[in-house]
Amino acid sequence: MEARPLVAILGAGESGCGAAVLAKKVGYDVWVSDSGNIKPTYKAVLEQHGIAYEEGTHTESRIVGAQLVIKSPGIPDNAPIIKKIREQHLNDNTSETVISEIEFAARYTDAKMICITGSNGKTTTTSLIFDILRRAGLDVGLAGNIGNSLALQVAENDHDYYVIELSSFQLDNMYDFRADIAILLNITPDHLDRYGFEFQNYINAKMRITRNQTASDAFIYWSEDPVISRELEKLNLKATLFPFAEKKTPLSATANSVNMAYVDGDNLILRASTDEPFSLPVSELSLRGKHNRLNSMAAGLAAQILHIKSDVIRESLTQFAGVDHRLQYVATVGDVRFINDSKATNVNSCWYALESMTTPTVLILGGKDKGNDYSEIDKLVSEKCHTLVFMGLHNEPLRQHFGSWFKGLIIDTDNIHDAVIGAFKAAHPGDTVLLSPCCASFDLFKSYEDRGNQFMQIVRSL
């Protein structure tokens, strides 16, 4: 009997296990390799499906010889094992050998793909679109950075629609994938340590969301983002463009078109469908702040393109509860409000959080610096913050930047307990303590969720 082709899967987390199950189902010989320890829940999945795996090491000979390699988004392209794979397959007359789980899964489903990327707002917008489609009664799955693995859903419970949050890391290893609706919310510097500290490399990764789109597809984007506007001038996109913005303005990138979503006076307007424009008072949006108006526009346009009824869109935009760890109210203690924005893992995300603050603020920030330029938040910090609390193992970049000009109180800590206690002592009645770190969480925490959960636990014990 002819041997089945081998697929090697690097990383046995959510995406890796899902890819393994799908690969086994469609006829591959599957080998899963994780250089760390595999969580018991994922081991159980692999063993249930009879999938071979290893942990704590990579058996290079077996991995390099695989016909296809599906890698975790967390593994960079310059990792030694990835370099060896590509060297081995350099002369292959085939498509890319190293791909992402999303790329692999899409090969085995005919579902419509609604894909969302951007430096900030991805999770909120993805969750909001999923909420709209689910309220509309569509058979829809949630995948990518949130929800279950796309590959596992395709293998075990394929849907008609998928709403997929895509990071730049996932987009890096997608080649034939095509989004029916692609949404690009914004592009600001992030993950520069992964991209050789070259902003353009990160930009190029984000723009890959438009890859392979045809005239029958839709590209929704924020037309007021200068980086996106500049990049669109370089590209000859085939997709139909659906721009959104705070103001209704003509757009050179779309010939004689104007924004398809905008704010007119006190109303949010959507006009992507041939029906009457959709109008909703901004005050009725469940999500507050400029950034969430933009997220709501993007989600609303996607819903209109899919011919979702206006009543359903209105219901979702006015009732959606938001996502955990993104401007999440925790508690009020001694007339001091505590807000968990642990998902703010870059400077621009913190900017949006500060922009939404309406009271004097104590800002807790710090963590794993990714080549951050903190000057982006200087003006808002100066206007809204009277105290900064640094929380990280290496606060030198924060001290160097803010210590030279910030006139308020600076509290330097190396753990979240001391950060919360210090922030509470520095706050006055009526103030807000905002955890919006600007940084990745991996210096002190397992994830931004772990960071947010610890923050909330300490706050509730005050």
Image: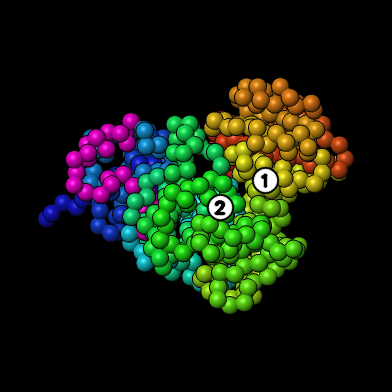
- Local crowd size for mark 2, using a 10 Å CA cut-off: few (<14), some (14–19), many (≥20): many
Horizontal side, residue 422 vs residue 140: left or right: right
Residue 355: which quarter of the image?
A: top right
- Residue 98 lies in the magenta stretch: yes
Circle 1: residue type: Tyr
Write down the region rendered in magenta. 80-106
Residue at (56% x, 58% y) in the render: 251
Circle 2: residue type: Leu
Residue at (18% x, 40% y) in the render: 91
- The residue lying toward the viewer, choosing from 216 and 128, is 216
Residue 428: which quarter of the image?
A: top right
- For the question of whether residue 18 can be seen, the reply is no
Q: Position of residue 78 (x, y in %)?
A: 36, 33
Q: Position of residue 25 (x, y in %)?
A: 30, 59
Provide the residue designation for mark 2. Answer: 185
Horizontal side, residue 412 vs residue 84: left or right: right
Q: Could you tell me how far apart the alpha carbons at marks 2 and 1 are, in whole angstroms?
A: 13 Å
- Earlier in the chain: of badge 2 and badge 1, it is 2
The C terminus lies in quadrant: top right
Residue 40: which quarter of the image?
A: top left
Residue at (42% x, 52% y) in the render: 235
Provide the residue designation for mark 1. Answer: 352
